[in-house]
Image (spheres, rainbow, N blue to C red):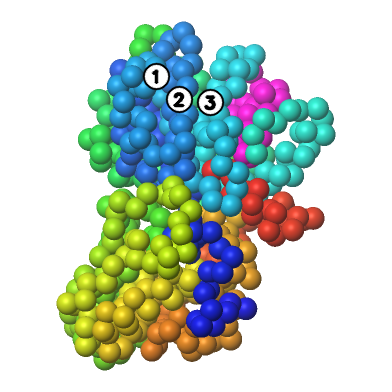
Amino acid sequence: MIEPLSHSPFSGSTFKEEIDGDTLHEECGVFGILGHDDASALTALGLHALQHRGQEAAGIVSFDGKRFHQERHMGLVGDHYTDPATLARLPGSIAIGHTRYSTTGEVAMRNVQPLFAELEEGGISIAHNGNFTNGLTLRRQIIATGAICQSTSDTEVVLHLIARSRHSSTADRFIDAIRQMEGGYSMLAMTRTKLIAARDPIGIRPLVMGELDGKPIFCSETCALDIIGAKFVRDVENGEVIICEIQPDGSITIDARKPSKPQPERLCLFEYVYFARPDSVVGGRNVYTTRKNMGMNLAKEAPLEADVVVPVPDGGTPAALGFAQASGIPFEYGIIRNHYVGRTFIEPTQQIRAFGVKLKHSANRAMIEGKRVVLVDDSIVRGTTSVKIVQMIREAGAKEVHIRVASPMIFHPDFYGIDTPDADKLLANQYADVDAMAKFIGADSLAFLSIDGLYRAVGGENRNHARPQFTDHYFTGDYPTRLLDQNGEAMGSKISMLASNG
C-alpha cells in the first residue's frame, strides 16, 4: 500500500525514479538500409527519429565490402552520431542501427545492440525491438551445452541459434533461429550481402518497409522514413521474413517469405496509446488521429462540467484536444513541459528533490487560477507523477482538479518489450475502486477510458472478446502467447532480466 500524502510517496526512491519512474518505457527502435552509399548517415538520422523509443544507448554496424564496422555508445543518438568522425568510422553501403532503453535491467555496453558475431559463413549482426518470452529458457539450454554468453540480452540467444543451425545459407539459419523464439519482436539482421527483416507471428511490435533511391529500408516507425525523405512501401506482415540481397551485378533482390499458417495480427495497443510518435502511421492508422479519438471517446464516457481542458504533456496532448472538441470545454496549455531536462542527474540535495516534478512540468497559472480544470493524460502507471501534478495545479490556484485518462487501467505487467513495474506497484492494483485512486492522487474525480472506447478509437469497433484484434494484456490479462520464462521464475527477477534485452 502506498503511504498517504502526508508522507512522501517517493520515500526510498531515487531521484531518477521520481523524474522518470512513473512511465512505461518501450525497449527499442531499429533501422536498416541496404545498398546506399550513405548507409550509416541515413541510419543515424533514422535512429534520431526513433529516439523516443529508447534513450539509454545506440549502436550502428556497417559493412564496406571487406569488413564490418561497429560503433556503440551510451546516451542519445545526437550525442555521438552527428560527429563526422564517428560516421567516417562506419563506411559501407549496408548498415543497421538500434536505439535502446532499459531501466530495471543492466545498463552496460555489452548489451548495446546491434550485436555482432563471426560465423563460418561470415559475419552477421542483429538488432531487435521487443522481448522473447522463452529467451531465458533457451539461454539456459544453450549454456548447459557449453555456450558462452557475453551479454544479458536475449538477442544473443538468436546469434547462438543461428550459429547452431544446420542450414547452409545465413537467411535459412536466421529463419530457423527465430522460428524457435516466442514473444513479441521486430528484428533486423545484416550479413555481407543481405538485410533481413522479421516480425513476430502475431505482429505485436511494428516494423515497416520503405525505399530511398530504389534501396530497401526497414524501421520501427514511418517517422524514421519521413526524416530521410524515404517512401513508405508497406508494413512487414506478422510472421513474415523479408530477405533483401545485393547481387554480384549490383542489383537487389527481395524475397518475402510468409508463414504457412498465418495468424491474425494483434498489434500492441500501447503503440497507439503511448509509444509511437504522433506523426507515425502504425498498422495503417495515423497515431495522432487515434489519440484524438481516444480523447473524444473519453469525453463521451466520462462527461463533466469544467472550465478548461489541460493536457499532461506531451503524451496527453492529442487526447486532450479530442476531449476538448467533443466536450466543448476550451483547451489550454495549462502545464508547460521543460524539454531540456537531462536524463543523468547528479543526486541533488533534499531541498532540490522537493521540487520534484517541477523539473519537467510547470503550471501555467494564468490558464488555471480560479478554474475547474480537467487534466487529460495518456495513461497512469504508478500514479506517483499524477500526485505531484495535481498538487502543482492546486498550488497554481485551480478551484477543482479532475483527471481523465485516455486509456484503461493497467493491471498486468508486460513481457513483450515494455518495461513495466511489478503488478503490485501498478496503481490499479493498490486500491479497491476509482474513487480510492482519486483520493490518493488528490483529484476531485478520476475516470479512465473503457477498453471498448480504446478499441473504437484505434480500430473502429468494440473488442472481440473471443478473438481480440489487438494485444491488450496489460489492461485485460489476456496474454497473446504463452509465457514460458515465467515457469520457475520470480516475477521481479524475471522483469529485471528481460528489461535489459531490447
Secondary structure under tag 2 reads: strand
Disc 3 designates what residue? 125
Q: Is residue 163 magenta?
A: yes
Q: Are marks 1 and 2 in contact (CB under 8 Å)?
A: yes
Question: Which residue occupies 70% across, 31% down?
Answer: 149
* Amino acid carrying mark 3 in the image: Ser
The x and y percentages for residue 151 are 64, 34
Residue nearest the observer in this picture, 40 or 462: 40
Callout 3: few (<14), some (14-19), or many (20+) C-alpha neighbours within 10 Å? many
Disc 1 designates what residue? 90
What range of the chain is rendered magenta? Answer: 153-174
Image height of 42 relative to 375, above or below? above
Residue 91 visible in the current orientation: yes
The x and y percentages for residue 385 are 43, 69
Q: Quadrant of residue 431?
A: bottom right
* Amino acid carrying mark 1 in the image: Leu
Disc 2 designates what residue? 71
